[in-house]
Amino acid sequence: MLITTTPTIEGRTIRQYHGVVTGEAIIGANFLKDMFAAVRDIVGGRAGAYEKTLRKARETAFADMETAAMELGANAVVAVDIDYEVLGETNGMLMVAVSGTAVSVD
């Protein structure tokens, strides 16, 4: 499955548009990650636990979108957009949402 943020795929012709496909993943941040991230913010550096969690959420969202595209008979997704949102009463959850257009290309 080809997945791209561009509206076309160079050297390939879009033969059919199947429609918009999406994928979402909502991940809760736990107390230990919050505590270590706070320490990391004070002393500097990267918050590895958050980065790993964010990466997993993004991969899950992309996998869901790819599955939706395959179910429509597509072999590619173009014009992909990735959005990140903080959710919850105390901003304790992170949502990654991806969307694009499922297409069939040569």
Image (spheres, rainbow, N blue to C red):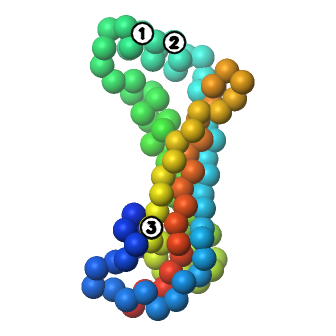
Tell me the amino acid under the disc marked 1: Val
Label 3: state its secondary structure.
Answer: strand
Q: Is residue 66 left or right of residue 45?
A: right
Q: Secondary structure at mark 2?
A: helix
- Which one is closest to the eye, mark 3 or mark 2? 3
Q: Which residue is mark 2?
A: 35
Q: Callout 2, which amino acid?
A: Met
The residue tagged 3 is 79
Question: In front: mark 3 or mark 1?
Answer: 3
Q: What's the CA distance linking mark 3 and mark 2?
A: 37 Å
Residue 3 in view (yes/no): no
Crowd rating for badge 3 (residues with CA inside 10 Å; few <14, some 14–19, many 20+): some
Identify the amino acid type marked 3. Ala
Mark 1 burial class by Cα count in 10 Å: few <14, some 14-19, many 20+: few
- Please state if 96 lies on the left or on the right of 44 as rendered: right
- Can residue 100 be seen from the camera position used here? yes
Q: CA distance from mark 1 to mark 2?
A: 6 Å
**What residue is disc 1 on?**
39
In this view, the residue in front, 89 or 63, is 89
Residue reaching furthest to the right: 89
Which residue is found at the position 39% from the left and 13% from the top?
A: 41
What mark, if any, has residue 54 been given in the picture?
Answer: none
Which quarter shows the N terminus?
Answer: bottom left
- State the residue in front, 71 or 82: 82
